[in-house]
Image: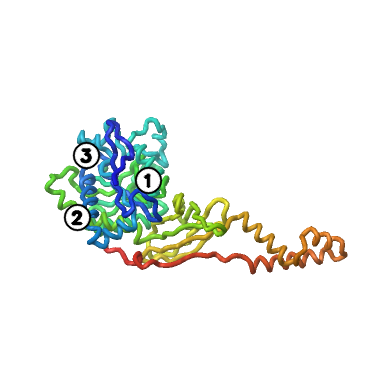
C-alpha cells in the first residue's frame, strides 16, 4: 500500500510503502520503518528499499522469513526522505538543510522553532505520532557500520555516550552487522558497530529523537563506503545487505517482550505504558485501540516489567528473557473499584447483613466500643488478605517467536 506522509520543499510527495498482510489496518503487531536517502547524495538506501519491497512481495509465499514479516509486522518503507536533495545530487534538501540535524535535540535546543523546521522533518515527526513504531533504521552511505544512540554528548566532546538501552542497541546493531556480508569484519569499528557519539557527535539527529520521543529503537546504518556507486554495483550491495535488513525487521518479533494491557473490570484494552525497572528510558506506549505493546530488549537477562495506566494500579512482573521473544499480558485493577471492593469486604465480613451505620451505633452504645472496633479492624484485615485479587499474568513463550535469530 502506498501513502504519502507529506511533501518536500519542492512539493514532491514523500511516498511510503506499507508491507503487511493487512496494510492500513490496526493489528496487535509491531511496526518497523526504514528511511532511505536522508541525505540527497546517498541514494543506495533508496534503491535497496525498493529492492527489499519487491523481494518480500515476490517471496512471502516461499521464504519463511518473508512470510513471518508479512504476517507479523507492519513494515513501512520510505525510500526517499529527501527527493529534492537527490535531484540536486547534494546532501541537504532544497533549502540546503541537513535533515539529520533538523530534529529537536535533547541537549542543545537550537532548532526548537517549529516554523523553521523543514517540511521533510515535520513529516517524519507527524508520522511517528500516527504510527507506533517499535524500531527503525535510516540508511546512509559513505561508511560501513551500524550506528546506535546516543549520537550526541552533553559536553560536545567525542566519546562513548551510552543510552539507557545500550545493551539492546548493541544487540540490534550486531544483528545487522553480523548478518551482513562484511560489515562485522570492519577494521575501523569493532564488530561493525559503533556508538554514534564515540564516532562523531551530532545534534538534531533523527536517531536520538526517535528513541526519546517515540520510544522507537532507531539505528543509523551506513551501508556502502561509496556514496554514489555505479548502478551495476547495486545487485551486489543488495545481496550484502539483504539478510541484515530482513533479520533486523524480524528482530521486532523474534526478540523482546510483547503483550496487551487489559482492565480487570470490563476486560477492555487499556492504552497504558510499559517500562523496565532500572532502565531510565521513554516508557513504551501501548496502542490506543488494541493496547498492544512491543518492547525491544537484549536477550539473556532478567527484567522487571511494569505496566501502568492512570486510574489503575500498576503491576510488575519479573521475566527471564532468553533468545526468543516473550508474550506478557497485563490485567490492571481500577483504583476506585479496588477501594470499593475492600469496603464491601469489610462490610460482608463484619456486618452480617446489618448496615455499617447500625453497627457503628451498636458499638458506640455498648461499653465495649473500643474492643469491638479492634475486632472489626482485625476481621477486615483478614478479609482483605483473603479477597485480594492475585495478579493475573499470562506468561508464555510463543512457538513461532522462540527461534533464535540467524546471525
Ligand atoms: Zn548520511
Is residue 271 left or right of 101 when viewed as pictured? right
Question: Is residue 186 something that shows in the picture?
Answer: no
Q: Which residue is mark 3?
A: 41
Q: How is the image coloured?
A: rainbow
**Residue 367 falls left or right of residue 191:** right
- Tell me which label, 1 or 3, sits earlier in the chain: 3
Mark 1: few, some, or many residues within 10 Å (few <14, many ≥20)?
Answer: many
Residue 278 locus on image (x, y percent): 47, 57
Task: Classify mark 2: helix, strand or loop.
Answer: helix
Residue 125, position in %: x, y? 38, 40
> Which residue in the structure is indicated by mark 2?
240
Name the N-terminal-most of marks 2 and 1: 1
Task: State how far apart marks 1 and 3 are (Cα).
Answer: 22 Å
- Quarter containing the C terminus: bottom left
Residue at disc 3, secondary structure: loop
Q: Is residue 62 visible?
A: yes
Horizontal relation, residue 368 to residue 23: left or right:
right
State yes or no: Cβ of the residue under disc 1 lies below 8 Å from any atom of ligand 1. Answer: no
Instruction: Name the spot of residue 242 as percent of width and height, x first.
Output: 22, 55
Horizontal side, residue 43 vs residue 173: left or right: left
Q: What's the residue at 41%, 43% (across, down)?
A: 129
Contact between marks 1 and 3 (CB within 8 A): the answer is no
Q: Which residue is the site of mark 1?
A: 208
Mark 2 surroundings within 10 Å by alpha-carbon count, few (fewer than 14), some (14 through 19), many (20 or more):
some
Instruction: Give the mark nearer the N terminus: 2 vs 3.
Output: 3
CA–CA distance in space, label 2 to label 3: 21 Å
Nearer to me, 89 or 169:
89
Front residue of 165 and 115? 115
Q: CA distance from mark 2 to mark 1?
A: 27 Å
Amino acid at each position: 500500500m502506498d501513502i504519502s506522509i507529506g511533501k518536500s520543499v519542492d512539493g514532491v510527495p514523500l511516498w511510503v510503502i506499507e508491507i503487511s498482510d493487512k496494510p492500513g489496518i490496526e493489528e496487535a503487531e509491531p511496526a518497523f520503518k526504514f528511511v532511505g536517502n536522508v541525505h540527497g547524495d546517498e541514494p543506495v538506501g533508496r534503491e535497496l528499499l525498493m529492492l527489499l519491497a519487491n523481494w518480500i512481495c515476490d517471496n512471502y509465499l516461499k521464504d519463511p522469513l518473508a512470510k513471518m514479516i508479512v504476517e507479523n509486522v507492519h513494515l513501512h518503507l520510505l525510500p526517499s526522505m529527501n527527493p529534492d536533495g537527490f535531484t540536486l545530487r547534494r546532501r541537504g534538501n532544497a533549502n540546503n538543510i541537513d535533515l539529520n540535524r533538523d530534529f529537536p535535540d535533547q541537549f542543545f535546543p537550537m532548532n526548537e522553532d517549529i516554523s523553521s523546521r523543514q517540511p521533510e522533518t515535520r513529516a517524519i515527526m507527524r508520522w511517528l505520532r500516527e504510527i507506533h513504531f517499535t524500531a527503525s533504521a535510516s540508511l546512509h552511505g559513505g561508511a560501513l557500520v551500524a550506528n546506535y544512540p546516543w549520537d550526541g554528548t552533553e559536553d560536545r566532546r567525542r566519546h562513548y555516550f551510552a543510552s539507557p538501552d545500550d545493551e539492546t542497541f548493541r544487540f540490534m546493531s550486531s544483528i545487522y552487522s553480523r548478518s551482513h556480508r562484511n560489515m562485522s569484519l570492519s577494521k575501523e569499528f569493532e564488530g561493525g558497530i559503533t556508538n554514534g557519539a564515540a564516532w562523531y557527535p551530532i545534534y538534531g539527529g533523527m536517531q536520538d529523537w526517535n528513541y526519546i520521543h517515540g520510544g522507537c529503537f532507531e539505528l543509523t546504518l551506513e551501508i556502502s563506503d561509496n556514496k554514489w556507486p555505479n548502478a551495476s554495483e547495486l545487485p551486489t550491495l543488495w545481496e550484502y545487505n539483504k539478510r541484515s535488513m530482513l533479520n533486523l525487521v524480524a528482530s521486532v518479533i523474534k526478540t523482546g517482550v510483547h503483550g496487551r494491557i487489559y482492565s480487570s473490570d470490563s476486560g477492555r484494552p487499556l492504552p497504558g505504558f510499559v517500562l523496565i525497572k532500572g532502565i531510565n528510558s521513554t516508557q513504551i506506549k501501548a496502542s490506543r485501540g488494541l493496547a498492544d505493546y512491543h518492547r525491544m530488549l537484549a536477550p539473556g537477562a532478567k527484567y522487571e516489567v511494569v505496566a501502568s495506566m492512570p486510574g489503575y494500579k500498576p503491576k510488575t512482573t519479573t521475566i527471564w528473557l532468553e533468545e526468543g521473544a516473550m508474550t506478557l499480558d497485563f490485567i490492571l485493577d481500577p483504583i476506585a473499584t479496588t477501594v470499593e471492593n475492600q469496603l464491601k469486604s469489610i462490610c460482608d465480613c463484619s456486618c452480617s447483613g446489618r448496615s455499617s451505620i447500625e453497627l457503628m451505633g451498636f458499638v458506640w452504645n455498648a461499653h465495649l466500643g473500643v474492643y469491638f472496633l479492634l475486632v472489626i479492624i482485625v476481621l477486615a484485615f483478614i478479609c482483605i488478605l483473603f479477597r485480594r485479587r492475585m495478579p493475573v499474568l499470562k506468561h508464555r513463550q510463543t512457538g513461532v517467536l522462540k527461534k533464535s535469530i540467524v546471525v
